[in-house]
């Protein structure tokens, strides 16, 4: 007897539908063959399926089974096929009613005792199932809240194989997952974050971070040890604009594939903040593996990638950042496939000016040789520095300011200005869906959207000539000027906005 069951696979960040055909030959010699480009984990599924069926009190006749996974050109990996293969075997051996399989998709790993276990990539698979017109999806119970993020498809949470079979025979129906209790509002609260109000002094650094948040710009902070660079970077999520539901789902899909979601509260409602250690590998940073997984740049999509102690990352690791910084996505090529993951993040980097940390500090002598300082700074390549819009010095804070009990402006107040600036950008970019924030503008967009007041144009021209700035530096100043004007609520970029933008240009720290 032949049965057909539908299952799902993940390719990159997209779900695909896989057809599982099981042929049962009651006269054949005992064998269980899986064909259709399965990897080792799918081959192992034979043992899990056999044990799970028997331990659920069902029959697994020792005869010949052939399982075909289609389409054949799609590589099948992981344990998500356990449940559909088991259902296929049961249907082919007359232990599951065939009509109950219509319009349904099954995913889940099986344990030997027949319980159904969590798998990764539920969100993209469910989304594809809905697009392809499936009426319901059977998922591991733990994964039901995630599947339910896709509206308008019935989600059936399954605990065990035996329970599912009783459901399919309508003996003991499993109620569909109810979405009423789900909270799909963004943002969640930002409790536990350092508030900008508690960071003493560093007003100009806070301002630079406000500009960065308002336009999605990259930032490099340079300063001696212990002045608050790490503290400020970690406080940044508190002033970032809230995500739209669409952005939240986009981020959640990446975390679903990377298998980093909280099963009970799967929707990512706060912009990601990723702070990988400097020992991270290139594959860890941009993604990779024999079957590519998203790396830190994609996990930081729509949020922040914080690289603390930037020079420690190693030149090769940093060079691979250039493509995602430029294209806002990464392409990972493997023998069989080239996959693209989104990677539109704000890069926030922090570093000391030299190995001992005190080069240029007026109150503390630097013990490094000039050669050592130069080598340290040269670890960050010019092209990488060129892709950072905002460069800011973080100096030591006076004792008076540190011990001052007055609180600064709270993050919530800064975030309000950031939101208003983003609202202006959204209105401006209504006809340009590829632009989320000013930092995304390419040269053509800059021409369209950055109108300068006369005096501002003059200041920019003089500066360009005097400092011999590159074309990229010119564009960088214009983009920043646009964001600063947006924070000020001005459609025209004025001279004060350009003057502030110029201050954020990269400086040679070495004198
Ligand atoms: N401006 C500040 N306001 C309040 N606390 C501060 C400030 N600067 C530093 N601190 C305190 O000092 C600690 C160390 O600061 P932080 O880790 O941010 O320094 P850093 O600039 O990153 O230094 P390093 O270069 O060594 O990494 C913070 O956890 C905080 O307690
Ligand atoms: Mg630090």
Image (cartoon, grey):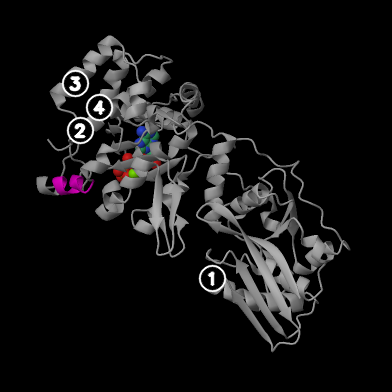
Circle on res. 463: 3
Tell me the magenta residue range: 373-380
Furthest toward the right, the residue is 171
What kind of secondary structure does the magenta stretch mostly adopt?
helix
Look at 41% across and 20% down and name the residue there. 486
Which one is closest to the eye, mark 3 or mark 2?
3
Give the Cα separation between the discs numbered 4 and 1: 52 Å
Q: Residues within 10 Å of mark 3 (few under 14, many from 20)?
A: some
Q: Earlier in the sequence, mark 4 or mark 1?
A: 1
Instruction: State the mark number for residue 98.
Output: none
Residue hosting label 1: 37
In the rendered image, the residue lying farthest to the top is: 454
- Counting from the top left corner in percent of width and height, residue 452 is at 31, 15
Q: Is residue 77 visible?
A: no
Rendering coords of residue 411 (x, y %): 48, 28
Label 4: how many Cα within 10 Å (few below 14, some 14–19, many 20+): some
Residue 33: x and y, percent?
62, 79
Residue in front for this viewpoint, 193 or 387:
387
Q: Which mark is residue 507?
A: 2
Give the mark nearest the N terminus, 1 or 2: 1
Closer to the camera in the image, 230 or 292? 292
Q: CA distance from mark 2 to mark 4?
A: 15 Å
Name the quarter showing ligand 2. top left
Mark 2 packing: few (<14 Cα in 10 Å), some, or many (20+)?
few
SS at circle 3: helix
Say whether residue 319 is left or right of residue 115: left
Q: Residues within 10 Å of mark 1 (few under 14, many from 20)?
A: some
**In this view, the mark in front (2 or 4):** 4
Badge nearest the viewer, 4 or 1: 1
Q: Residue at x 29, y 38 (%)?
A: 387
Query: Which numbered disc covers residue 474?
Result: 4
């Amino acid at each position: 007897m032949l049965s057909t069951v539908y299952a799902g696979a993940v390719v990159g960040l997209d779900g695909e539908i896989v057809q599982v055909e099981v042929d049962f030959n009651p006269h054949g010699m005992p064998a269980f063959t899986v064909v259709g480009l399965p990897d080792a984990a799918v081959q192992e599924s034979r043992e899990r399926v056999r044990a799970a069926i028997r331990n659920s009190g069902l029959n697994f006749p020792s005869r010949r089974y052939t399982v075909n996974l289609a389409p054949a050109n799609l590589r099948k990996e992981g344990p998500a096929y356990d449940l559909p293969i088991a259902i296929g075997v049961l249907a082919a051996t007359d232990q599951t009613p065939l009509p109950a399989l219509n319009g349904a998709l099954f995913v889940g790993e099986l344990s030997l005792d027949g319980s159904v276990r969590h798998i990764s990539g539920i969100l993209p698979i469910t989304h594809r199932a809905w697009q392809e017109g499936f009426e319901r999806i059977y998922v591991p119970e733990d994964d039901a809240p995630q599947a339910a993020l896709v509206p308008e498809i019935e989600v059936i949470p399954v605990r065990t194989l035996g329970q599912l079979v009783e459901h399919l025979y309508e003996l003991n129906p499993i109620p569909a997952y109810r979405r009423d209790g789900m909270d799909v509002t963004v943002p969640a609260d930002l409790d536990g974050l350092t508030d900008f109000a508690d960071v003493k002094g560093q007003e100009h650094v806070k301002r630079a971070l406000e500009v960065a948040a308002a336009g999605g710009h990259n930032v490099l902070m340079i300063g001696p040890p212990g002045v608050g660079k790490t503290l400020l970077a970690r406080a940044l999520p508190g002033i970032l604009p809230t995500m739209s539901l669409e952005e939240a789902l986009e981020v959640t899909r990446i975390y679903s594939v990377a298998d980093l979601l909280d099963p009970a509260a799967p929707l990512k409602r706060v912009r990601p903040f990723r702070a990988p250690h400097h020992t991270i590998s290139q594959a860890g940073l941009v993604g990779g593996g024999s079957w590519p997984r998203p790396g830190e740049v994609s996990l930081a999509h729509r949020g922040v990638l914080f690289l603390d102690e930037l020079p420690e990352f190693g030149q090769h690791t940093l060079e691979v950042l250039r493509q995602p910084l430029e294209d806002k996505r990464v392409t990972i090529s493997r023998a069989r496939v080239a996959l693209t993951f989104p990677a539109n993040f704000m890069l926030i980097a922090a570093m000391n000016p030299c190995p001992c940390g005190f080069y240029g500090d007026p109150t503390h002598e630097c013990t490094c040789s000039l050669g050592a300082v130069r080598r340290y700074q040269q670890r960050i390549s010019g092209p990488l520095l060129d892709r950072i819009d905002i460069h800011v010095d973080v100096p030591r804070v006076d004792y008076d300011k540190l011990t001052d009990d007055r609180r600064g402006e709270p993050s919530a107040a800064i975030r309000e200005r950031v939101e208003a600036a983003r609202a202006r950008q959204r209105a401006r970019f209504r006809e340009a869906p590829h632009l989320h924030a000013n930092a995304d503008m390419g040269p053509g967009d800059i021409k369209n959207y950055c109108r300068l007041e006369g005096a501002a144009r003059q200041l920019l021209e003089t500066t360009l000539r005097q400092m011999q700035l590159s074309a990229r530096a010119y564009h960088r100043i214009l983009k920043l000027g646009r964001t600063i004007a947006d924070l000020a609520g001005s459609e025209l970029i004025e001279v004060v906005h350009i003057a502030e933008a110029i201050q954020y240009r990269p400086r040679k720290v070495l004198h």
